[in-house]
Amino acid sequence: MKLLVIGGGGREHALAWRLAQSPRVQTVYVAPGNGGTARSRQIQNVALTDIGDLIEFARKEKIAYSVVGPEAPLAAGIVDAFQADGLKIFGPIREAARLESSKDYAKAFMMRHGIPTAAYQTFTDPAAAHRYIDEQGAPIVIKADGLAAGKGVVVAGTLEEAHAAVDHMLGDGGFGAAGAQVVIEECLEGEEASFIVMCDGHNVLPLATSQDHKRLLDGDHGPNTGGMGAYSPAPVITPALHNRVMREVIHPTIAGMARDGVPYSGFLYAGLMIGPGPDATRSLKVLEFNCRMGDPETQPIMMRIKSDFSEALELAIDGRLNDAQIDWDRRTALGVVLAAANYPATPRTGDPITRLAKDTDDCVVFHAGTQLEDQVLKTSGGRVLCVTALGDSLKRAQAAAYDAITRTHFDGQQYRRDIGWRALHQAGAASNETGQA
Ligand code: AMP
Ligand code: GLY
């Protein structure tokens, strides 16, 4: 069968790469794809982004089903449009995607359904927002309501920073319509983890856990980015905590959406903040929902899938996720992002990729911001590559990824040297002793 993956980043390359390995799959089309998907034999790029054009393509090519990678087409209603045309697609409908596309919607939803999250208030009036900040004190977190490509959150350490963020979002229209409303919330402390599940409206299948590294520089310093590297599993999510996340966050969310008349199908990503203490009592709160898989979390997660992922997706689309199963490689996968010069502010593009480590069974270079120009692979975006390796321990996966990086090069490349540091600092983290996917 033929499948269509919508998007063009590292997440979509990893998804297409995994799906292309299914014996049932003849071709995976990626729209628009990137330089990496352009080079694979069973994967073909399609230069389309318009929803109407994608529908026409899916119909003409008799695509068995489509999968959506990024949030923007979901928030624009791509799933509603495909379904209206009788085409199979995996992702939430527009109304359900509001869990990501409106922070105010997500917060109100969590309050209504008793899902643990930081205390907050929503503002459109700058004067009221400034007053609230003075009452609450710093640190405090200011979030643009709408989609802001990962740049709409300011964790303000001081009152000055918090007031400036409100002025930028509400006063200067710094984020356009996305910032016409701001959520101001309590600053949480702890360790972050990405908990991603598949849903079919009612049933849930958790994917392997993972952890991202959001800051640009080693030691979690520097500006926030889309994510500089990730690994799976996340040892912080012990089996006991896994059960708590399912019970306290995931099941109430899926049940709550169904009760609100907006059953959730698609990938659901809960960004969690896990406080200190013993598993049974440590604080567990949702920082955010995303209505898609994470990037770069998807890259290590896809490396660890051993079963036919195309089957799980098809069952999910058909509302039969309770029949689906995913077999996980017990090893750890770790991916390091190579970003372009001047990322994240003003990434430089057009640098030729002069060396590229050869893919093996246990190490794959997933492409994000690359494109093929007259057979020359060049950088075309902020996050360029994600070098992802499997290893018997986190340490070995890390060593293998960094070793492959020594065989990969483009001018201006920047990457973190410490991906995996949190897990390495945790006792017993070097092996998959928890037995948890
Ligand atoms: P978000 O886009 O909501 O994931 O926020 C981006 C990043 O900001 C998160 O990954 C956290 O590192 C941080 N963040 C968001 N909300 C909070 C909060 N309430 N307290 C502390 N950090 C936060
Ligand atoms: N890596 C974080 C995200 O995809 O939102």
Image (spheres, helix red, strand yellow):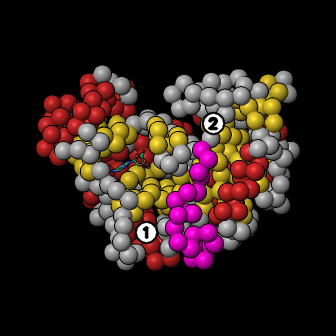
Q: Identify which residue is drawn at 24% across, 33% down.
A: 160
Q: Quadrant of the N terminus?
A: bottom right
> Circle 1 is placed at which residue position?
245
Q: Is residue 420 magenta?
A: yes
Q: Is residue 404 above or below residue 305?
A: above
Q: Amino acid at mark 1?
A: Val
Image coordinates for residue 196, horizontal then vertical, percent: 53, 59
Q: Nearer the viewer, residue 223 or 113?
A: 223
User: What is the magenta range?
Assistant: 416-437
Q: Nearer the viewer, residue 121 or 210?
A: 210
Q: Identify which residue is drawn at 34% across, 32% down.
A: 179
Q: Counting residues from the N terminus, which is met first, the one under dot 1 or under dot 2?
A: 1
> Circle 2 is placed at which residue position?
414
Quarter occupied by residue 271: bottom left
Image coordinates for residue 376, horizontal then vertical, percent: 82, 27
Q: Amino acid at mark 2?
A: Gln
Q: Is residue 412 visible?
A: yes
Cα gap from disc 1 to disc 2, whole angstroms? 34 Å
Q: Is residue 89 magenta?
A: no
Left or right of 305? Residue 81 is left
* Mark 2: secondary structure: loop
Assess disc 1: are there few (<14), some (14-19) or many (≥20) residues with their C-alpha within 10 Å of its C-alpha.
many
**Dots 1, 2 in contact, CB < 8 A:** no
Q: Is residue 313 visible?
A: no
